[in-house]
Amino acid sequence: MAASAVPRFTHDEFLEREQQSPFRHEYIRGHIEMMAGGSERHALLCAAIVRILDTALLDRDCRVYGDAFLLRMAAADISSYPDAMVVCGQPNFVERRKLVLDNPIVVVEVLSPSTEDYDLREKLPAYQQVTSLKEILFLSQDKAAVQYWYRQDGGWKSVIVEGMEAVIPLRHLAIDIRLADLYRRIDWTS
């Protein structure tokens, strides 16, 4: 018996299906993958980073989005829903449905045990190919720690920021994020 081939989809076919689906999916080089569920820590960290960024950027021409929009990483042929994005200036929706953006300057992902390897191995290099992107944050759920990536001198640099007293200096936006504020509602005993 012949093995059945995994169906491949165009990005437009994916968007048509995604708009009709009650569930969220990612598009990865022609394949559609259902997104994993979240946890309380994941939800609290997503809410905190959106609140912190939105408050800090309230008087600037920047918009902070939660996970409502897909980010198109055309060079890697991936579209996914980051946990948060910042777009300064006009958002560039890449299709008429206004479901997909391609011009964030900051992307935030909350790492989950089930997706951490994929996020760091596949998504990070794809994010780094988005020309508008200046800063990438990967937030840990297990401890007060953030992998902070920033574009500098034509390449990407990274630093691990750890501990409740630590601060993430978002260079491009010229704002600081205190880990004490970001992780304030996390119950480390559960």
Image (cartoon, rainbow, N blue to C red):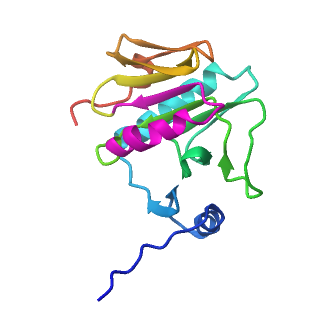
Give the camera-side residue of 83 and 46. 83
Q: Where is residue 133 in the image (x, y as percent from the top left)?
A: 61, 30
Q: Magenta segment, which residues?
A: 117-140
**Magenta span has 14?**
no
Q: Is residue 19 above or below residue 92?
A: below
Q: Which residue is drawn at 51% across and 57% down?
A: 29
Q: Is residue 169 left or right of residue 101?
A: left
Q: Where is residue 63 in the image (x, y as percent from the top left)?
A: 69, 32
Quadrant, the N terminus: bottom left
Q: Which residue lies furthest to the left in this view?
A: 189
Q: Is residue 130 above or below residue 118?
A: above
Q: How many marks?
A: 0
Q: Is residue 173 left or right of residue 29?
A: right
**Magenta span has 119?**
yes
Quadrant, the C terminus: top left
Q: Where is residue 56 in the image (x, y as percent from the top left)?
A: 62, 19
Q: Which residue is drawn at 43% across and 56% down?
A: 35
Q: Which residue is drawn at 41% across and 37% down?
A: 110
Give the camera-side residue of 28 and 71. 28
Q: Residue at x 28, y 26 (%)?
A: 143
Q: Where is residue 95 in the image (x, y as percent from the top left)?
A: 74, 55
Q: Is residue 20 left or right of residue 40?
A: right
Name the image quarter holding residue 34: bottom left
Q: Residue furthest bottom?
A: 1
Q: Is residue 59 above or below residue 66?
A: above
Give the camera-side residue of 151 and 190. 151
